[in-house]
Image (cartoon, rainbow, N blue to C red):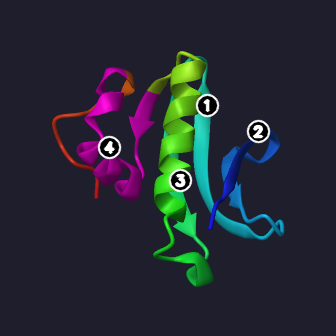
Amino acid sequence: MSFAVTDVPERERFEARTEAGETAGIVTYQLTGAIIAYTHTKVTPEFEGQGVGSALARAVMDDARARRRTVVPICPFLSGWLDRHREYDDLVVRSTRKVR
């Protein structure tokens, strides 16, 4: 199944939707100038395990690159995903300690 990911700036989130228009997942964010902090990722339970989280992560990171934004990954899911996708390291600000 494929998911269309779009930015919904008035709600400060990206949404992944099915071809039928169902919301499969979201990533919330806070934008300050050229810095975007991704705060939370949520996948709708019936879509868990179908790649929604990864589709969202790739889409938000590609969007940040296209808009020349610096990323602060507050969300634990996104932070873990970025640990496995080092091609985005040039966009990411990482602290020396983990936020729990």
Quarter of the rendering occupied by the N terminus: bottom right
Mark 4 highlights which residue?
Answer: 82
Tell me if mark 2 has few (under 14), some (14-19) or many (20+) residues whose alpha carbon lies within 10 angstroms of its own.
Answer: few
| Mark carried by residue 63 | none
| SS assignment at label 3 | helix
Mark 3 highlights which residue?
Answer: 55
Mark 1 highlights which residue?
Answer: 31
Apparent side of residue 85 relative to residue 33 in the rendered image (left or right):
left
Q: Nearer the viewer, residue 79 or 95?
A: 79
| SS assignment at label 4 | helix
The amino acid type of the residue labelled 1 equals Leu
| SS assignment at label 1 | strand
First-in-chain label (3 vs 1): 1
Q: Position of residue 36 (x, y in %)?
A: 53, 31
**Which contiguous range is marked in magenta?**
71-90
Q: Is residue 19 magenta?
A: no
Q: Position of residue 6 (x, y in %)?
A: 73, 45
Marks 4 and 2 sit apart, C-alpha to C-alpha, by: 23 Å
Tell me if mark 1 has few (under 14), some (14-19) or many (20+) residues whose alpha carbon lies within 10 angstroms of its own.
Answer: some
**Whether label 2 touches label 3, CB < 8 Å:** no
The amino acid type of the residue labelled 4 equals Leu
